[in-house]
Image (tube, rainbow, N blue to C red):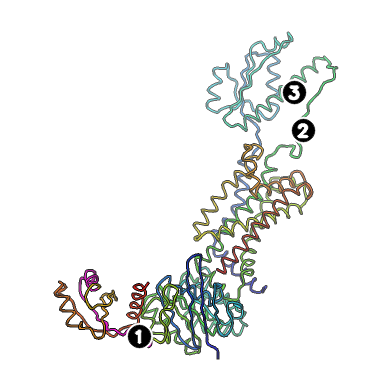
Amino acid sequence: MEPAISVRGLVKTFGNFTAVDGIDLDVPRGQVFGFLGPNGSGKTTTIRMLTGTLAPRAGSAHVLGEDVIRHPDRVQRRIGYMSQKFSLFEDLTVEENLRFYGGVYDLPADEFAAQREYVLDMADLHGRENELTRNLSVGWRQRLALGAATIHSPELLFLDEPTSGVDPVARRQFWDLLYDLANRGVTLFVTTHYMDEASHCNRLAFIYRGRIIADGTPSEIRSRHLTQRVLDVSLAGVDAALPWLERAQGVEGAYLSGATLHAVVATDSVLGEDELRRRLVAAGFADAEVTEVEPTIEDVFVNLVERQRAGS
Amino acid sequence: MSSRRIRLLIWKEFIQLRRDPLLIRLLLIMPVMQLIMFGYVVAVDIRHLSTAVVDLDHSSLSHKLETSFSGSGYFTITSHPVDEASLRPLLDRGTVTVALVIPEGTEARILRGEVAPIGIIVDGTDSQVSAVASGYASQIVAQFNTDRIEASGVSIAAPGVEAQVRVMFNPSMDPLNTMIPGLIAVILMLSLMAIMSQAVVKERESGTLEQMFVTPIRATEYLIGKITPYALMATAQMLLIAAGGLLWFRVPFNGSVWVVLTGLALFMLTCIGIGLLISLVSRTRHQAQQAMMFLMIPTMVLSGFIFPVQSMPAIIQPLTKLIPLTWALDVLRGAFVKGSSFTALAVPLLALAGFAVVIFGAAIVATRRRISE
């Protein structure tokens, strides 16, 4: 079977600004593919080209075996799309929203009835069919949007920051729904800037300033792009310690990670937990605690971005 | 293109419209309110001006003159100040707008065959009222002179020219007869531009626009689905105004329905086009509203809806030709009042067709491009 997505040399410019700068992508079927990158790095532009709503400047894009640039209409019935805005008509009821999207895809009555039932189950909206979408809380709206985007049983679903602005509990529940879809054979193409969500994906690609700077499975990316060790530094004066760490001898990179600092050091560096702590205390950070940690995907990407910035 | 998808889009649009009770009320109340406002408040004919008569002559001639003023219907004599000094406060306070002063010895002078000057004082605060009032007053005096000469038995055998002014097309000079046809076009413009300018920008804000174009919905289907409901609604509003104007205010309709419909259809496309263009350049609904206001004021002032184009400075007049409403008013007023045919209204109709092609065309092309960008 042809891959879900196959992209070669895709370019999109807006005036003088190159939003997407010659990217290649291969997404096999049945995977949860994470497309990561900071805001403004070209994620949404790429999705819009892959869904056939934006014409690229150059390059080719095949989605489900069809040339999406030339024949977006052949692709659009077979894909689904959900954006961070959830894209529901807020002044329509739950039922009317489903009816609208079902009608748009020309679903026969019996198929619509079955899909409607499935969505109401999945989104836990039984008995609230006649409520205005506007009055639903964010978690419900998000699940209804997922239901509306999949009402025509797409083979491939694009999700553009589907969890932004949603609380952590709802985010976890939402990922459970995505796994259900993946288990039913749907390929998922998910963008996010929550790095912890990256570990939910089978494969990842990291886009930065319009270029893909890393791709592979999460463990491949970790082993390929981060050969150094990561030391977690916990102390009260984080703001003062960060510039010190950035200048410290032997520290290749330092950044904020949650409430603590991460310092990247070479594998063969003399800097270990004890040595770094000793130097921090000597520099006046008496309460510093240093622990070596397993690098996360976030560590990898922060490092990649730092290296790109240093290189450019 | 799928007619089923277009029907679905129209269905969705009508539900959304129904869920916005304020908008529906505004759309229904607006034409009724404007009809009442322009029908009763703005455009009333100038009659029954309160008038003071200062009769210092106390003769039979002065009584006759006063009677011809009060009998005309234009002047209602409300007071008789004893002298000119006590007239002034009445004018200052606005108690009277017109005063007729007949000096002592007027009758005696006329009997001697002399010219007898009388005074007509008009409050010039409102230029329109004063112009009309002095016009009526001169007419009455002229008529009074003619009657008196004929009554004296002196025949003016010498051939002379007698000017008879006849107001054509609108003999009653009722401003309503031009105001209401104009109102039909104005309502059409106000409601279509107001709604269309919000329509697309609202869906872009909520993200539903980008969502719809990932589905099989095509740009053309979307536009037809968007425009149809509001075009229907604007038509209903126009019918409301036309019915109110023809049946309640008894505005005469002398022309061809087809001329009116052609003009309105072309003007409708233009208004939809302007609304869509506003919607495209605005990022938020608030911006769209501001842009609407920005366009609306020069349109109302320069189109000739309220102030006649002929009374505008010569430099401004060519500008009025750039405003579609100007031409729509030409067509509607021409057809209603003069019963003008297609041939007589060829210029304004062609101008409207030009606006429709350019503005509506640009809006469709720009919307399609914007959607696919």
Q: Which residue is mark 1?
A: A222
Image spot of residue A104 (x, y percent): 60, 76
Q: Is residue A306 left or right of residue B22?
A: left
Which subunit holds the residue at mark 3?
B
Indicate the amino acid at tag 2: Arg
Q: Amino acid at mark 1?
A: Arg
Question: As displayed, is residue B302 above or below residue B62?
Answer: below
Crowd tier of the residue under label 1, counting other residues whose Cα lies within 10 Å: few below 14, some 14–19, many 20 or above: some
Q: Position of residue A124 (x, y in %)?
A: 46, 81
Going by the image, does B318 lie left or right of A179?
A: right
Give the residue pinned by disc 3: B143
Any part of residue A272 in sight: no
Query: Of helix, strand and loop, which one carries label 2?
Result: loop
Q: Which residue is mark 2?
A: B166
Between marks 1 and 3 in the image, the one whose residue lies nearer the viewer: 1
Does B114 appear above or below B96? above
Label 2–label 3 contact, CB within 8 A: no
Q: Residue at x 61, y 28 (%)?
A: B50
Q: Please say if the residues under marks 1 and 3 sit with CB atoms less than 8 Å apart.
A: no
Work out whether residue B204 or residue A144 is closer to the camera in this orientation and state it.
Answer: B204
State how far apart marks 2 and 3 are (Cα): 15 Å
Whether marks 1 and 2 lie on the same chain = no
Q: Nearer the viewer, mark 1 or mark 2?
A: 1
Q: Is residue B88 covered in magenta?
A: no
Q: Amino acid at mark 3?
A: Gln
Identify the magenta region: A220-245
Q: Is residue B68 in view from this perspective?
A: yes
Q: CA distance from mark 1 to mark 3?
A: 107 Å
Upstream in sequence: badge 2 or badge 3: 3
Report the front residue among B125 and B147.
B125
Residue B246 point in image, percent of width and height: 71, 48
